[in-house]
Amino acid sequence: MDSFSAVEEATFQEKPKNSVDKTSVKRWLTGAEKDEDEEECDTEAWETLNKSFKEAQSVLDQNRLLIQQVNENHQSKIPDNLVKNVALIQEINGNISKVSSVYSNLSVNFASFVHQRRVKNKNDKLDRSDS
């Protein structure tokens, strides 16, 4: 097995479920106890983040297959296959832009969720202190 295959194998193996408790992470991010509105917000946030990660992973998996095809075409040294590589490499580059955009949007969404939660918690603390 060559080194690329070993790295690829390690990278794409199914990983065990994360042992970090999502509730603990959410509380750490927000510094607050849960209520029904917060739970709904958390669900929305986790679903949005999960959707983004799945989208990015799908495009990365597609790129992995395209790269394998490019390597096979290159090793064949058949002129038509080498010409096909131009389009394949262009598709790979386009996919890299998609992944970059997905991660950029994910970052903005995550920051927005954290900000919204912190503002809500601050307002809740102020409301409690006024009571």
Image: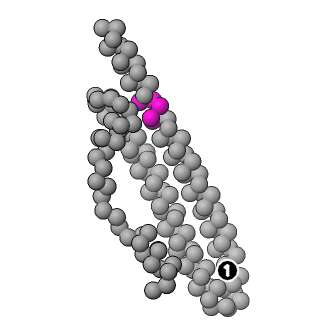
Residue in the image at 66% along x and 72% along y? 89
Residue in the image at 67% along x and 80% along y? 84
Of residues 68 and 131, the one nearer the viewer is 131
- Residue 13 sits in quarter: bottom left
Residue 81 screen position, x and y as percent: 66, 85
Residue in the image at 54% along x and 51% along y? 103
Q: Is residue 131 visible?
A: yes
Residue in the image at 44% along x and 24% along y? 119
In the shown orientation, is residue 124 left or right of residue 61?
left
Q: Say which quadrant the C terminus sits in.
A: top left
In the shown orientation, is residue 55 left or right of residue 100?
left
Range shown magenta: 113-117
Does residue 2 lie above or below 119 as drawn?
Answer: below
Residue 117 screen position, x and y as percent: 41, 30
Residue 74 screen position, x and y as percent: 64, 85
- Residue 44 sits in quarter: top left
- Magenta residues, dominant SS class: helix
Question: Circle 1: is it few (<14), some (14-19), or many (20+) Cα within 10 Å?
Answer: some
Task: Name the kind of residue labelled 1 in the image.
Answer: Lys
Q: Say which quadrant the N terminus sits in.
A: bottom left
Element class at badge 1: helix
Does residue 8 lie above or below 17 as drawn?
Answer: below
Q: Is residue 40 visible?
A: no
Single out the residue that lies furthest toward the top. Answer: 131
Of residues 116 and 6, the one nearer the viewer is 6
Name the residue tied to disc 1. Answer: 84
Residue 52 screen position, x and y as percent: 47, 51
